Amino acid sequence: MRFRKVIAFITTVLLLFCTVGVNYTAAKPMRGTGTVSDPYQIATESQLYLINNDKRACYQLQNDIVLTADWVPIGEGTDGGATSFQGTFDGNGYKISNLTIDTNLYGYVGLFAYNNGIIKNVGVDIHIVSTVPSPSFAVNGGIVGENDGTVDNCFASGYISAVKNMGGIVGENYYSGLIENCFSTVSFAPNLTSAGVGGITGSNRGTITDCYATGFMSGNPYMDGGAVGSYYGGSITGTFYDKETTGCTDSGKGTGLTSAEMKTQASYTGWDFDSI
């Protein structure tokens, strides 16, 4: 256990010093105490990355943020455990733009690498190009690479090109993962051997409810789904995708609609519009 803590500390220090363009070590201290009633308040790019210092705390975004340097996913470096995000991140309705990741170094790609906590109320605009040479260890999503917690009321726009498990919101939604009330307009450009590509998540074992996707998918023989890519089980309800913009007509992993139907409230059966 002590060895894992040392490795985690070294990884964090290296990421802090190796990220080009932003001096994360000089970040202004965040207001708040990190509790549910008094979350840490994030107002700058450097403060956003300070989440790595305490992934069990509560955070709240205070404004839109435009990133100025290539992003290192929060928690990147190990597979879950103590380095996964286990706190609460409330985007407070704001957006993080210019989230750029262009590398072959990261297996878990997104704003967050791995989530066991709660991520809610945030939007991202992304440009992700991941060329990890080991496809079985690659999950790529706008909000989080691998989700085994809750992602609620989030949206993503932009572009992803990778080798496996690409989703506009989540790369891989695991057994305890919940994605709800989210939408994505992310476009995808997988290579000719890509598998697990979906507008909401690249692969699913968990629960997805009340989501929709409209992003373009350039075709290849392994293209999987307008909303969900590889389906290994779990539950998908109230989830829709645009058959025309995605170019997908798969069934059983969400409901395909025409572009005209996507603009009609009556198409979204099961959604509660009255209490929004």
Image: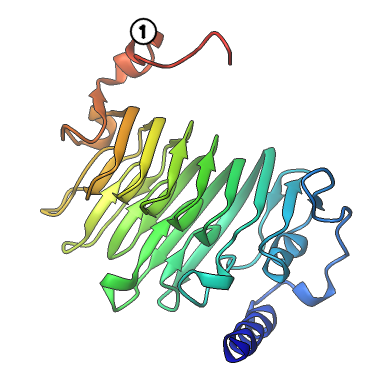
| Drawn side of residue 180 relative to residue 27, left or right | left
Question: Percent from the top left, x then y, of residue 250?
Answer: 16, 35
Question: Percent from the top left, x then y, of residue 92?
Answer: 71, 38
Residue drawn at x 70%, y 50% is 65
Q: In this rendering, is residue 227 above or below 260?
A: below
Residue drawn at x 43%, y 16% is 271
Q: In this rendering, is residue 206 above or below 68?
A: above
Q: Quadrant of residue 186?
A: top left
Q: Quadrant of residue 123?
A: top right
Question: Percent from the top left, x then y, of residue 193?
Answer: 16, 64
Q: Quadrant of residue 254?
A: top left
Disc 1: CA contacts within 10 A as few (<14), some (14-19) or many (>=20): few
Residue drawn at x 38%, y 68% is 130
Q: In this rendering, is residue 99 above or below 137?
A: above
Residue drawn at x 75%, y 73% is 24
State which quarter of the image contains the C terminus.
Answer: top right
Q: Is residue 23 visible?
A: no
Q: Disc 1 marks which amino acid?
A: Ala
Q: Residue furthest front?
A: 1
| Drawn side of residue 74 relative to residue 43, left or right | left
Q: Is residue 14 visible?
A: yes
The residue closer to the viewer here, 118 or 127, is 118
Q: Which residue, given by chain and number where applicable, does mark 1 sit on?
A: 266
